[in-house]
Image (tube, rainbow, N blue to C red):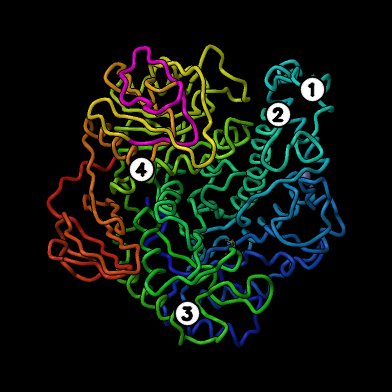
């Protein structure tokens, strides 16, 4: 069932930072842009609880009254993402201890120790009080707990909790010693209290590496769970007074520290903040939207934040060009967003975000380019009404994204510092993006059934259950692809012995004996066996022995392993399992995907590189988004039939797309059995 009736159009709104005459002006101006919602009370803790036993919701009451009078839908924050100063001073345990081991005093935001009992008590109490006061109001359409959860704490209390968590997980210290292979570097533990948190004072090697990945990965798991518990405790407090309003917290794409698949299970709707920088590839943004949709098995998500114009916190905060904000808003919708929200509605007067773009700028009126663009979009979205709400993506291709793999792969010391998990995933996503194929980003727990083909780049860490699931999928006719750095370790980062890629060897029909790391900018030549086309690889070269697999490509270079396989395909049951032993260049990827798709029935569209097309399906209708992501006119011949909901253009008659152009074609003439 749809969570919202029509597209929420609004954003973060902080009237408590302004005198009241400005509030009235806000209402007048925002109304001109058809803004229909506001996210409030995100950072007001210090104002609504001025001291330990005093809660003062009077200003919040006034804000909510005003918004209700003006027919706003309200996304209500719980304000717990930034501590009040009195709390930090009176109860220092609420403050985080950082990576270097320094207990902070007060400042910034996202500053609470997730395991502080004081923080837990007061955040829960505040969420409960807010729900008691406002939970029954019809205009409150969503709860927004905390804000951009993240970071970690290394305080002594976290250390004690970590020890308890480990006890619960491993039961005996012997099990833990085995899991972490502690006989390495004299780490054998004899009691739980000998275990310290893996920061700069412990096993960390710089910020990114560690002497014991087992410990450090467990700390990621523990920290992610600790923060999720904060979310759950506020959620529970809200649910006491409000059983039904959806509850979310805003996520940050491929943010490393938190296992978002675990978070999403507890959220009623996923929401996220999209802040690409001037040089972020469009395909990367596209992948992040797909990941956010994938967290809850394809359910639509909220675009909780984006800037209407520029950020303030990136190295170069370029403006979005005329038309670009509209284009990016529709890109989010194309991938499954049911809301378009900005940070923020009015630009702040002080603090580090004073140069962050907003719907109402420092000039304070509606006569700005940015406002005109927001306003034009507001009118369009209003016209679209509920047409696209709850539309689903009919993807038949899945890409596995897994946080423990992200952590494990990047902690690994060797074989190359160039290996980055998200980049490797994007490398495969990009090729699918080029072919305009709908893709679901999925977890290892997602049901594989609906997918014709699943990509799992750098599936470094696997357990036997996961391997069985993959094997079954292939046997039953699925196509599976994995790459170098896969199947190497178990969940605590110990190597699966007996040859690489460990338990995946059988499905893949290969054995990898060694892997070579290429120095920066070095390439290795390779040749596809069937048509003798050449391509190149970089970064890593697996030296592969094919056992039952067919060899698709071989190294063809002056390396000692020249002539040995680099890409293989194994037939298992009714399906196929591919292995790619290097990071292919663009022509290699093209060639490989041609081979894979030869045997699959997947719709691909080769459109000019500037153009993206994605589909949402609803009520047996298919809405095809066509987005020109560049600031230039592009000649096209669109292989689609139907009318554009935005401009009434007929797809088949369109010969060119304007800079940042968007079409939403209600497609005709195709069956719609693609929706699962
Ligand atoms: C994040 C936060 C907001 C704001 C914006 C600025 O997404 O959630 O509070 O700081 O960044 O880009
Ligand atoms: Zn702590």
- Is 543 part of what is drawn in magenta? yes
- First along the sequence among labels 3 and 4: 3
Spatial distance from mark 4 to mark 1, Cα to Cα? 45 Å
Question: Residue 418: where, in percent of width, then height?
Answer: 55, 40
Question: Residue 423: where, in percent of width, then height?
Answer: 49, 43
Please report the bounds of the magenta region as a residue range.
Answer: 535-560
Looking at the rendered image, the disc whose residue lies closer to the viewer, 3 or 1, is: 1
Crowd class of label 3 (few under 14; some 14 to 19; many from 20; radius 10 Å) = many
Spatial distance from mark 3 to mark 1, Cα to Cα? 61 Å
Q: Which residue is mark 3?
A: 30
Left or right, 549 with respect to 42, comes to left
- First along the sequence among labels 4 and 1: 1
Dividing the picture into quarters, in which one does residue 33 lie?
bottom left
Please tell me which residue is depicted at 58% across the width and 30% down the height of the picture. 415
- Is 459 part of what is drawn in magenta? no
Question: What is the number of the mark on residue 586?
Answer: 4
- First along the sequence among labels 2 and 3: 3
Q: Which residue is mark 1?
A: 187
Dividing the picture into quarters, in which one does residue 60 lie?
bottom right
Given residues 413 and 102, the one toward you in this image is 413
Q: Which residue is mark 2?
A: 212
Please tell me which residue is depicted at 43% across the width and 68% down the height of the picture. 9
Q: Secondary structure at mark 1?
A: loop
Q: In this rendering, does residue 564 appear at all?
A: yes
């Amino acid at each position: 069932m749809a969570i919202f009736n029509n597209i929420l159009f609004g954003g973060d709104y902080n009237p408590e930072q302004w005198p009241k005459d400005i509030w009235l002006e806000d209402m007048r101006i925002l109304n001109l842009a058809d803004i229909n919602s506001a996210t409030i009370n995100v950072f007001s803790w210090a104002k609504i609880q001025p001291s330990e036993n005093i809660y003062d919701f009077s200003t919040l009451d006034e804000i909510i009254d005003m918004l209700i009078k003006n027919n706003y839908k309200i996304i209500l924050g719980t304000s717990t993402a930034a501590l009040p100063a009195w709390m930090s001073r009176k109860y220092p345990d609420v403050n985080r201890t950082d990576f270097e081991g320094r207990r902070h005093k007060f400042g910034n935001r996202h500053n609470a120790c997730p395991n502080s009992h004081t923080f837990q008590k007061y955040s829960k109490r505040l969420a409960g009080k807010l729900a008691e006061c406002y939970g029954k109001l019809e205009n409150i359409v969503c709860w927004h707990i905390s804000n951009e959860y993240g970071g970690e704490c290394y305080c002594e209390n976290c250390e004690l909790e970590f020890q308890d968590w480990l006890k619960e997980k491993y039961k005996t210290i012997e099990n833990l010693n085995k899991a972490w292979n502690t006989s390495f570097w004299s780490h054998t533990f004899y009691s739980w209290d000998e275990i310290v948190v893996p920061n700069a004072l412990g096993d960390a090697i710089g910020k990114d590496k560690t002497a014991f990945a087992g410990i450090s990965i467990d700390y990621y798991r523990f920290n992610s769970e600790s923060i999720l518990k904060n979310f759950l405790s506020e959620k529970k407090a809200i649910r006491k007074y409000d059983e039904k309003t959806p509850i979310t917290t805003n996520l940050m794409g491929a943010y490393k520290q938190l296992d978002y698949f675990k978070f999403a299970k507890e959220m009623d709707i996923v929401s996220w903040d999209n802040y690409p920088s001037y040089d972020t590839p469009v395909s990367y943004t596209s992948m992040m939207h797909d990941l956010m949709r994938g967290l809850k098995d394809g359910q639509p998500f909220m675009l909780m934040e984006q800037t209407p114009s520029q950020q303030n916190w990136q190295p170069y905060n370029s403006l979005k060009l005329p038309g670009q904000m509209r284009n990016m808003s529709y890109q989010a919708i194309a991938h499954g967003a049911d809301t378009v929200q900005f940070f923020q509605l009015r630009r702040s007067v002080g603090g580090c975000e004073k140069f962050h773009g907003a719907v109402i700028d420092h000039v304070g009126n509606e006569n700005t380019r940015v406002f005109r663009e927001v306003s034009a979009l507001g009118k369009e979205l209003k016209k679209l009404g509920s047409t696209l709400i709850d539309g689903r993506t009919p993807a038949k291709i899945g890409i596995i994204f897994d946080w423990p793999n992200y952590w494990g792969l990047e902690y690994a010391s060797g074989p190359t510092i160039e290996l980055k998990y998200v980049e490797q995933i994007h490398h495969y996503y990009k090729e699918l993006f080029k072919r305009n194929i709908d893709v679901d980003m999925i977890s290892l727990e997602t049901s594989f059934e609906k997918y014709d083909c699943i990509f799992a780049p750098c599936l470094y860490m696997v357990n036997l259950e996961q391997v069985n699931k993959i094997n079954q999928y292939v046997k039953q006719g699925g196509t599976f692809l994995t790459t170098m750095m896969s199947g190497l370790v178990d969940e605590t980062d110990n190597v699966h012995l007996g040859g690489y890629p460990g338990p995946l060897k059988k499905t893949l029909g290969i054995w990898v004996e060694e892997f070579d790391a290429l120095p920066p900018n070095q390439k290795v030549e390779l040749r596809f066996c069937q048509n003798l086309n050449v391509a190149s690889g970089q970064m890593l070269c697996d030296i592969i022995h094919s056992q039952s697999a067919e060899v698709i490509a071989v190294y063809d270079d002056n390396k000692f392993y020249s002539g040995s396989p680099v890409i293989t395909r194994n037939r298992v049951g009714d399906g196929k399992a591919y292995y790619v032993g290097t990071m292919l260049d663009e022509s290699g990827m093209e060639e490989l995907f041609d081979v894979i798709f030869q045997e699959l029935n997947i719709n691909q569209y080769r459109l000019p590189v500037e153009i993206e097309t994605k589909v949402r399906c609803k009520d047996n209708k298919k809405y095809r988004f066509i987005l020109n992501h560049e600031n230039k006119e592009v000649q096209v011949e669109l292989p689609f039939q139907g009318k554009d909901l935005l401009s009434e253009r007929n797809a088949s008659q369109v010969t060119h797309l304007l800079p940042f152009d968007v079409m939403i074609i209600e497609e005709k003439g195709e069956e719609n059995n693609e929706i699962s």
